[in-house]
Image (cartoon, rainbow, N blue to C red):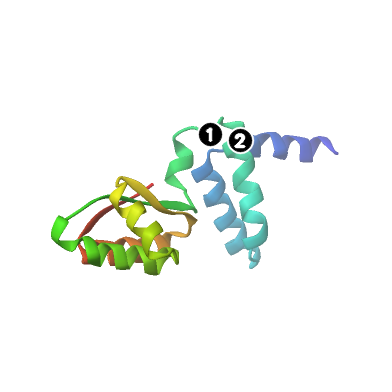
Amino acid sequence: MSAKTDKILDSLKELSLLEASELVKQIEEAFGVSAAASAGVVMAAPGAAAGGGGEAEEEKSEFEVVLESFEASAKIKVLKAVREATGLGLGDAKAMVEAAPKTIKEGIGKDEAETLKKAIEEAGGKVSLK
């Protein structure tokens, strides 16, 4: 590599996750390109170099939906919502709901996590996203 590219690479390694995300957006706007496939690679390297600090939580792309608790009178409704979201059988879904606080789904996108949270909360459960 040339000295110029080495310098750029070193600068990229020092970026926080938020700064790397902003850089990707600026490059997309400046050159009229989409960095969808490479954005994860660009963003992963600074996070790894930073040691996975608190900034990684600010720019999450995967979420975990956790059933914290539920109203006793709404147990059946919450159970149905969990079954719909997970595709589990009645026994497994019941065990999951009764084990609250329990992770219902993990590794999902923000939109899907928000939709699932809303559905379970409307059924009478208390949900958090992590």
Amino acid at pointer 2:
Ala
The residue furthest front is 91
Disc number placed over residue 48 in the picture, else none: 2
Question: Disc 2 and disc 1: Cα gap in Å?
Answer: 6 Å
Q: Is residue 35 visible?
A: no
Disc number placed over residue 52 in the picture, else none: 1
Q: Residue at x 42, y 65 (%)?
A: 89
Q: Position of residue 107 (x, y in %)?
A: 50, 53
Q: Residue at x 35, y 47 (%)?
A: 102
Amino acid at pointer 1:
Gly
Discs 2, 1 touching: Cβ within 8 Å: yes
Residue closer to the observer: 109 or 80: 80
The residue furthest top is 51
Q: Is residue 29 visible?
A: yes
Q: Position of residue 9 (x, y in %)?
A: 71, 38
Residue closer to the observer: 106 or 61: 106
In the rendered structure, the answer to whether residue 67 lies left or right of residue 111 reads left
Q: Position of residue 93 (x, y in %)?
A: 37, 59
In the rendered structure, the answer to whether residue 17 lies left or right of residue 78 reads right
Q: Position of residue 123 (x, y in %)?
A: 22, 66
Element carrying mark 2: helix
Please identify the quadrant where the N terminus is shown.
top right
59 shown above or below 116: above
